[in-house]
Image (tube, helix red, strand yellow):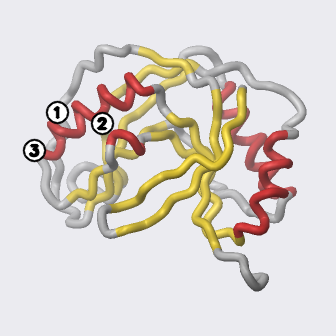
Amino acid sequence: MKEGYRKKRLFLAFNLPREVKLEVGDYLRILKNKNRGVSWVAPEGLHMTLHFLGDLDEGRIGSLERRLAGRGGSFERPEFEIGEAGAFPGPDHPRVVYLTLEQLNGRSASDLQKFLGRRLSEEGIEPDGRPWTPHITLGRAKDPRPLELPPHDFPVKSFEIKTFELMESELGREGARYKELFSYDL
């Protein structure tokens, strides 16, 4: 690390529209009352991660930002529908609690995620090689006891994403706080 630079924990994401964050926040309150031992995401921090970049020297951010801004084309704005709550690897021994999402208008989100992975590789950042599935992380289990994940009817049935963001994650005692560094139109 160059002298004077500190590391930042970065990721690329779709931020969710405000009304979706509010509605998912209502569901989070239900989940919190039914399940203990989970570190729940604050509603204002809800997002869909495209790529986790890890800890990068802040001196690399300018080069990364230019590479992402010059993506050489646009992508159709994805429209998503909120699905059911689930847990990975399963609700009996959860590590991650999430909401499934289904893109209603093609594969533009998946295409963008793959494109951004290639851009990251060009920047010397190796993306996660696992298949990407759109989802919203709701929480991380501190105690892997079985979960109760009641079905929920979300009033907003679908929503459109207009931008993606380069985000910073700051870890603290109260969990992660997210800060938008740059936003890119689709």
The disc, 2 or 3, on the residue closer to the chain's N-terminal end is 3
Look at label 3 and name its amino acid.
Asn
Q: Is residue 162 left or right of residue 99?
A: right
Count of residue discs: 3
Look at label 1 and name its amino acid.
Pro
Residue 165 pos. (x, y %): 63, 41
Q: Is residue 75 left or right of residue 71?
A: left
**Foreground: disc 2 or disc 3:** 3
Look at label 2 and name its amino acid.
Ala
Disc 1 packing (10 Å; few <14; some 14–19; many ≥20) = few
Which image quadrant for residue 92?
bottom left
Q: Which numbered dot is residue 33?
A: 3
Which image quadrant for residue 75?
top right
Q: Is residue 81 above or below residue 116?
A: above
The disc, 3 or 1, on the residue closer to the chain's N-terminal end is 3
Q: Which numbered dot is residue 85?
A: 2
Residue drawn at point x = 36 percent, y = 36 percent? 99
The disc, 1 or 2, on the residue closer to the chain's N-terminal end is 2
Q: Is residue 119 left or right of residue 5?
A: right
Q: Is residue 112 above or below residue 62?
A: above
| Residue hosting label 1 | 150
Residue 104 pos. (x, y %): 54, 16
Q: Is residue 166 left or right of residue 49?
A: right
